[in-house]
Image: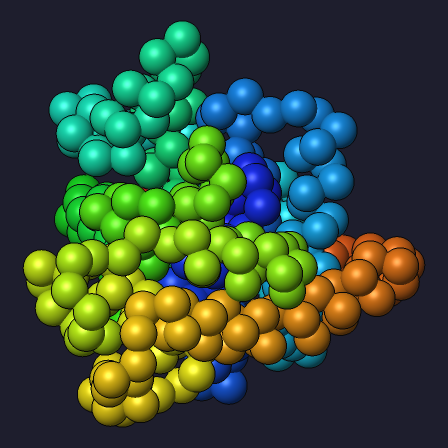
Amino acid sequence: MYSAVQPSGNLTIGNYVGAVRNWVKLQEEYEGYFAIADLHAVTVRQEPAELRARTKELAALYLACGIDPEKCALYVQSHVSAHAELCWLLNTVTYVGEASRMTQFKDKSQKHADNINMGLMDYPVLMAADILLYQTQAVPVGIDQKQHVELARDLAIRFNNRYGETFTVPEPLIFKGGARIASLQDPLYKMSKSDENPNASVFLSDDRDTVIRKFKRAVTDSGNEVRYAEEKPGISNLLNIYCAFKGCTIEEAEREFEGVGYGDFKLAVGETVADVLTPIQKRQRELLIEKEELKRILEGGAERAYKASRKTLSKVYRKMGFYRE
Ligand code: TYM
């Protein structure tokens, strides 16, 4: 299993229920490789000091959420050079047409019109390199990353056809419910780390009062029934969030909030989310103080990742005809 998060902003509850939380559940079943995707993050401008600080904070957050470094390799992407190397090799089997058709590339090009750099377009190829280096079977992600995992599949199949069996063809693993948490201010858009409206996203670092305030301000729909329905995107999103954090089904939640007004419902969602976040934040703070321990874990993770990735990378070089003794 392979997955990663970019240290490009504060993580939102979307990143948590769409990705990190599922990794924790799956780590018993799969051999996990989890990276902090710093090479991806620099495809949009980053303040160097902030990038460095966020990388450490994200590592501590993975651990605080329950990633077990004994079971998985937890590491920083740029510490394992095979990622950049395989990306280069995969570039030669990727068509400019398919890279330029990626939805996220088009969105980000619009959003960062003054910085449409080569890295932005190459982003999904680097992501394919991440995944394919570890002979990955499963890639647990939110729905917005599905297209990128599909490109990784296409590249693996194409490479295998051209050079002979080399890569395992990966599958995206997308969990119902948490796969697409929407913005609290405009439920037609996904909740995002980089939203300019601070009330649109709930961050894993938000304190209890902030979490509750943001949910109180969340946009709802006309009517007064707490019910999951296409024409009620605001309430449906809040129900999704509630269920993801409470561990119940939509039907159970609808029954629980029968006859309850929107205001009280929003308060209950806020309290439920805050109850889950508080202990994670406490553990993250402790881990950030235990600097040596964090450093040791990341070094161990990079070493494991290095060994596994070198195996695949050597195979790729050989298959492509690079001279090796
Ligand atoms: P990133 O950092 O944008 O997001 C990390 C993970 O969080 C999921 N996610 C969401 N899930 C539900 N609702 C949301 N509102 C929401 N927002 C984000 C994303 O789907 C993702 O799983 N390119 C990746 C990082 C990456 C990666 C990889 C992922 C680099 N290499 C290899 C998988 C495999 C990214 O930008 O994630």
Residue 287 position, x and y percent, is 81, 64
Q: Is residue 229 left or right of residue 216?
A: left
**Can residue 324 be spotted in the picture?**
no
The one of 311 and 180 positioned closer to us in this rendering: 180
Which residue is drawn at the image coordinates 15% and 24% (left, top)? 97
Residue 64: x, y in percent?
Answer: 68, 69
Give residue 157's position: percent from left, percent from top: 19, 51
Does residue 85 lie above or below 106 as drawn? below
State left or right for residue 175 relative to residue 244.
Answer: left
**Residue 103, located in which quarter of the rendered image?**
top left
Left or right, 72 with respect to 178, comes to: right
Name of the residue lying farthest toward the top? 114
Drawn side of residue 173 relative to residue 201, left or right: left
Q: Quadrant of the N terminus?
A: bottom left
Q: Nearer the viewer, residue 160 or 31?
A: 31
Identified at 69% across, 75% down, the residue is 279
Give how far across and how far down residue 133 sits, in percent: 44, 53
Image quarter of the C terminus: top right
For the residue pair 51 and 227, the one nearer the viewer reads as 227
Residue 104's image quarter? top left
On screen, 95 above or below 32? above
Q: Residue at x 59, y 77 (%)?
A: 275
Q: Is residue 173 above or below residue 245?
A: above
Task: Give residue 2's quadrant in the image.
Answer: bottom left
